[in-house]
Amino acid sequence: LGAGPLAGKRVIVTSGPTQEPIDPVRYISNHSSGAQGTAIARALAGLGAEVVFVTGPAQVAPPPGVEVVRITTAQQMLDAVQAALPADAAIFAAAVADWRVAEVAGSKMKKTEGALPTLSFAENPDILATISQMKKGRPALVVGFAAETDDVLANATAKRARKGCDWIVANDVSPGTGTFGGSENTVHIVREDGVEDWPRMGKQEVADRLARRIAEALHG
Ligand code: C5P
C-alpha cells in the first residue's frame, strides 16, 4: 500500500477537451490543453491517492502513476466516469463539449457545388451535475470548475448550487489575465460555507494546494 495522506483513497479526475464527431474525418472540439487537470492528477497521486484519469485528446501527457482512460466524446467520458465508481472524490477539470452533432454522418460529407451543409446539435450529458446529483453511491467530495469572464464569484456560486457539487474552483479567464494557455492561475474556492481567495500562483501550485485541501476534506 502507498503512503501519504490520500493512501487508500480513490479519486476520479476528468481532464482535457472532448471531441464530438461530424463525420468519420471531422469533429468539433475546444482549446483545452489538459494542463490543469493533469497537474491535479499528478498532485493527488503524489499524496498517495489511487487516481483514475479520464482524459480527452489533450496536449500534455498524462502523469505517471495514474490509471489512464482515454475517451473522445462527452458520452464516453460520462460512461468512463460511471465505470470508475465507486470513488471517494471526483474532480471534473475537463472542458466538455456542451453539444454534439445530432446525426453523425456515416461516411465523409461531400463538398457539393452551390450547397452548404447544415449541422443540428443535441445536448451532451452534464457529467459534473450527473455525478453530483447521484442518490446512491455519490463520491463524498465532488469538485467542479468554472472559467468565467464576468462576475466570477456570483456566477461560480450560482453554478455550485445548480450543479449540486461541493466545491467550485473558479477562475477569471478574461483576456488580459493570461490564464488561458498561461502557466499561472488565480482561483477562488467556492464552498457552501464561503469563498477562499488564493493568490496568483503556478498551475501546478494550484493543483498541489487543491490536493492538500482534498486530503483534509476526506479526513475531516
Ligand atoms: O457549465 P460549465 O461548462 O461552465 O461547467 C463547468 C464544469 O462542469 C467543469 O467542472 C466541467 O468539467 C463540468 N462539465 C461536465 N460536463 C459537461 C459540461 C461541464 O462535467 N457536459
Image (spheres, rainbow, N blue to C red):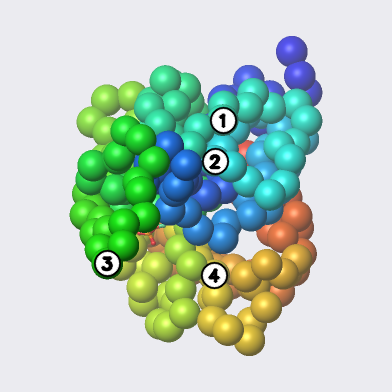
Q: Is residue 41 visible?
A: yes
**Could you tell me if the residues under marks 3 and 1 are in contact, i.e. CB atoms within 8 Å?**
no
In the displayed structure image, the side of residue 143 where residue 154 appears, left or right:
left
Element carrying mark 2: loop
Which of 60 and 110 lies nearest the eye of the viewer?
A: 110
Q: Residue 135 placed where, x, y %?
A: 23, 31
Q: Which mark is residue 56?
A: 2
Q: Identify the residue at image location x=47%, y=22%.
A: 84
- Kindly identify which residue carries mark 3: 114
Q: Identify the residue at image location x=56%, y=38%.
A: 55
**Could you tell me if the residues under marks 2 and 4 are in contact, i.e. CB atoms within 8 Å?**
no
Looking at the image, is mark 3 or mark 1 earlier in the sequence?
A: 1
| Residue 53 position by quadrant | top right
Q: Identify the residue at image location x=54%, y=76%.
A: 172
Looking at the image, is mark 4 or mark 1 earlier in the sequence?
A: 1
Q: Ligand 1 closer than 8 Å to the CB at disc 1? A: no
- Kindly identify which residue carries mark 4: 171
- Kindly identify which residue carries mark 1: 70
